[in-house]
Amino acid sequence: MKLLIAIVQDEDAHMLMDDLSENGFRMTKLASTGGFLKAGNTTLLLGIDEDRVDEALRIIEEDCKSRKTTTTLLNVTMPGEAYVPLPMEVQIGGATIFMLDVEKFIRI
Ligand code: 2BA
């Protein structure tokens, strides 16, 4: 069994969870926050039998869209210690996925 940790955009999370559920995948949704944008995103934990990992990845790829956003996260320090927000365009990926081997899976 593999544990997929998939970080996706909130906009895609609902449809993705529906599609994964309809195809028999079990998951846990965590509300998360990206370290760079400091904006909400969704982290899904999926315990998956190895022979179904590719299927899950295909569904994630179909549902999760890459988008551009503009952030004013970065500041430019001006003389006199004034901070001017600097708009910056950021491309957020469809999904960031970590895949781990599961040593043991127990449901009680
Ligand atoms: P954030 O950390 O809020 O990052 C949002 C997007 O900002 C990233 O999209 C990337 O395009 C950009 N970005 C991140 N750090 C940057 C930096 N130091 N300089 C310039 N641009 C930067 P993605 O790469 O698609 O990541 C989307 C979300 O996935 C991230 O949200 C974070 O929550 C998670 N993530 C990505 N890589 C990760 C990693 N190595 N470990 C843990 N979480 C990760």
Image (tube, rainbow, N blue to C red):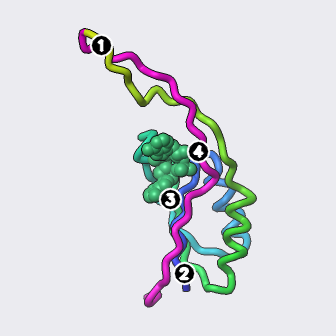
Separation (CA) of disc 3 from disc 4: 14 Å
Tell me the kind of residue under disc 2.
Answer: Lys
Mark 4 residue element: strand
- As for residue 26 lying within the magenta part, the answer is no
Q: Earlier in the sequence, mark 4 or mark 2?
A: 2
Respond yes or no on whether mark 4 lies under 8 Å from ligand 1. yes
Labelled pair 3, 1 in contact (Cβ < 8 Å): no
As rendered, which of 23 and 48 lies closer to the eye?
48
What residue did someone put label 4 on?
Answer: 92
Whichever of labels 4 and 1 marks the residue nearer the N terminus, that label is: 1
Which mark sits nearer the N-terminus, 3 or 4? 3
Q: Give, as a three-letter code, the residue at label 3.
A: Thr
Q: Secondary structure at mark 3?
A: strand
Q: CA distance from mark 4 to mark 2?
A: 25 Å
- Image: magenta residue range: 80-108
The alpha-carbon separation of the residues under discs 1 and 2 comes to 50 Å
Residue at which label 1 appears: 82
- The mark nearer the N terminus, 1 or 2, is 2
Q: Nearer the viewer, mark 3 or mark 4?
A: 4
Q: CA distance from mark 4 to mark 1?
A: 29 Å
Mark 3 residue CB less than 8 A from any atom of ligand 1: yes
- Front: mark 2 or 3: 2
Labelled disc at residue 49: none
Q: Residue at x 70, y 76 (%)?
A: 54
Residue 100 in sight here: yes
Q: CA distance from mark 3 to mark 1?
A: 37 Å
Number of numbered tags placed on the structure image: 4
